[in-house]
Amino acid sequence: MFRITQKGMNRLDIEMSGKLNSEEMKIALDEFASKSKNIENGKMLYDVIDFHLPSLGAIGIEFSRLPSMFGLMKKFDRAAVLTDKTWLKKVSEFEGVLFPGLEIKAFNKDQKEEAEAWLSS
């Protein structure tokens, strides 16, 4: 499952759970592109509920759209990731290096208030 909720003019909340197949990845990326179209200086809150690696087909879809995703990510300044998986925290914060201008910080699942405060600061 990949659910995107627009929260205000410049914020997207994203819930991720389970394993995405190629069709679900297409839908998720299309929805992300659509909902971030008018965002400037945006913020994202990722809530990783139960993460599984996507299928190989889904990864292929994601790689095929990397150029457009880089453009969309420039619309965002900060992303907070809620997860209890240590390796996901490290990987998500490393992704911040790949997207210049986007600061990514990981928080434990029970630190949602802290993540919200960080996004707002």
Image (cartoon, helix red, strand yellow):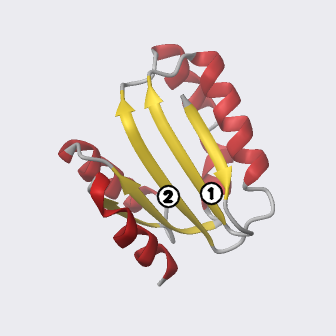
* Nearest to the observer: residue 58 or residue 111: 111
Name the residue beneath numbered marker 2: 45
Q: Amino acid at mark 1?
A: Leu
Residue displayed at 62% across by 57% down? 12
Q: Earlier in the sequence, mark 1 or mark 2?
A: 1
Q: Amino acid at mark 2?
A: Leu
10 Å crowding of disc 1: few (<14), some (14-19), many (20+): many
Residue displayed at 50% across by 24% down? 59
80 relative to 75 in the view: left or right: left
Where residue 60 sits: x, y (%)? 54, 22
Count of numbered marks: 2
Where residue 65 sits: x, y (%)? 64, 36
Q: Is residue 121 above or below residue 114?
A: below
- Mark 2: which secondary structure? strand
Residue displayed at 51% across by 22% down? 20
Where residue 37 sits: x, y (%)? 79, 56
* Nearest to the observer: residue 115 or residue 74: 115
Q: Is residue 56 above or below residue 49?
A: above
* Nearest to the observer: residue 48 or residue 68: 48
Q: Which mark is residue 12?
A: 1
* Nearest to the observer: residue 113 or residue 27: 113
Where residue 22 sits: x, y (%)? 59, 17
Quarter of the image containing the N terminus?
Answer: top right
In the picture, residue 31 is in which quadrant?
A: top right
